[in-house]
Each structure stands twice: as C-alpha cells, then as structure tokens.
Image: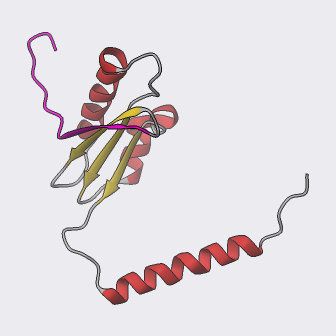
C-alpha cells in the first residue's frame, strides 16, 4: 500500500458464505493495535479484492488472551459484525474436559427447547 508492506497470516475464500476470511494469529494478548491492523486488512479486501457478488470480508483474530472490553470499544457495534476475536489454547482438552463441555452444551440446549415458544 503506497510503498508500505503488510503481511496477513492466512486468507481463505469461503465458498458457501461467498466472502474472504482473513485470519491473523497472535502469540500474546490481543491489543487495540491488532484490531486496527485487522480492520486495515478487511477494508483493503473489501475495496480492492472483493467482487460485486462477494459478501463483506470477515476478519478473525486468534490470540492467547483478550480483553472483551478492548474488543468492544475498539470495533464498536458495526465493525463487530465483521471482525471476531477468539482465544486459542496450546493444548488439547482432556477427555473429562470434553465430556463436561458436551454435557454443559446439552443441558443448555434442553433448557432452550423447554422454554415456551412465542405463538404467531
């Protein structure tokens, strides 16, 4: 960009969603600078690479830790729909951890199904 060089970690094209997906891997805690960098990448792809039939570019930041307030205030409501930040772990969960997580999700789904559905 005008003589400056930037390097995106991964770029994919999602054939079902019909959009570019940009992934940036961070080895530490997510910062507002990281979010701004991702916004730069998303804006560039939307303006220079996206075709007329493509949906808006999505950005995904994977980090070891993040502050949800920093993400919320840096991206605001509109940008938060295009850029996502999530933590990753450096090890796989144990079998017991996986079972607990599955049971928690099943319990949540059962509670959701038991709630009365609005008539209409």
Q: Residue furthest right?
A: 120
Residue 56, relative to residue 91: is it above or below?
A: above
Q: Residue furthest top?
A: 2
Relative to the observer, which residue lies in front, 73 or 27?
Answer: 27
- The range drawn in magenta is 1-15
User: Quadrant of residue 22 in the image?
Assistant: top left
- The majority secondary structure of the magenta stretch comes to loop
Left or right: residue 32 compared with residue 84:
left
Relative to the observer, which residue lies in front, 52 or 41?
Answer: 52
Relative to the observer, which residue lies in front, 107 or 51?
Answer: 51
Residue 37, relative to residue 115: is it above or below?
A: above
Relative to the observer, which residue lies in front, 48 or 27?
Answer: 48
- Report if residue 7 lies within the magenta region: yes
Residue 48 appears at what percent x and percent y? Answer: 30, 15
Disc tally is 0
The structure residue drawn at horizontal position 42% and vertical position 40%, both measured from the top left corner, is 73
The structure residue drawn at horizontal position 33% and vertical position 28%, both measured from the top left corner, is 42
- Report if residue 9 lies within the magenta region: yes
Residue 106 appears at what percent x and percent y? Answer: 57, 78
- Colouring mode (rainbow / by chain / secondary structure / one colour): secondary structure
Q: Residue furthest bottom?
A: 96
The structure residue drawn at horizontal position 27% and vertical position 28%, both measured from the top left corner, is 41
- Indicate the quadrant containing the N terminus: top left, top right, bottom left or bottom right: top left
Residue 55 appears at what percent x and percent y? Answer: 47, 28
Left or right: residue 51 compared with residue 102:
left
Residue 49 appears at what percent x and percent y? Answer: 31, 19
User: Quadrant of residue 117 in the image?
Assistant: bottom right
């Amino acid at each position: 960009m005008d003589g400056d060089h930037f390097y995106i970690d991964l770029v994919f094209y999602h054939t079902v969603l019909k959009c570019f997906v940009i992934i940036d891997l961070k080895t530490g805690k997510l910062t507002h600078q990281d979010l701004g960098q991702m916004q730069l990448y998303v804006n560039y792809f939307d303006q220079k690479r996206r075709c007329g039939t493509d949906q808006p570019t999505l950005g995904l930041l994977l980090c070891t830790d993040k502050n949800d307030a920093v993400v919320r205030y840096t991206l605001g409501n509109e940008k938060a729909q295009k850029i996502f930040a999530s933590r990753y772990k450096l090890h796989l969960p144990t079998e017991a951890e996986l079972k607990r997580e599955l049971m928690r999700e099943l319990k949540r789904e059962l509670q959701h199904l038991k709630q009365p559905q609005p008539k209409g």
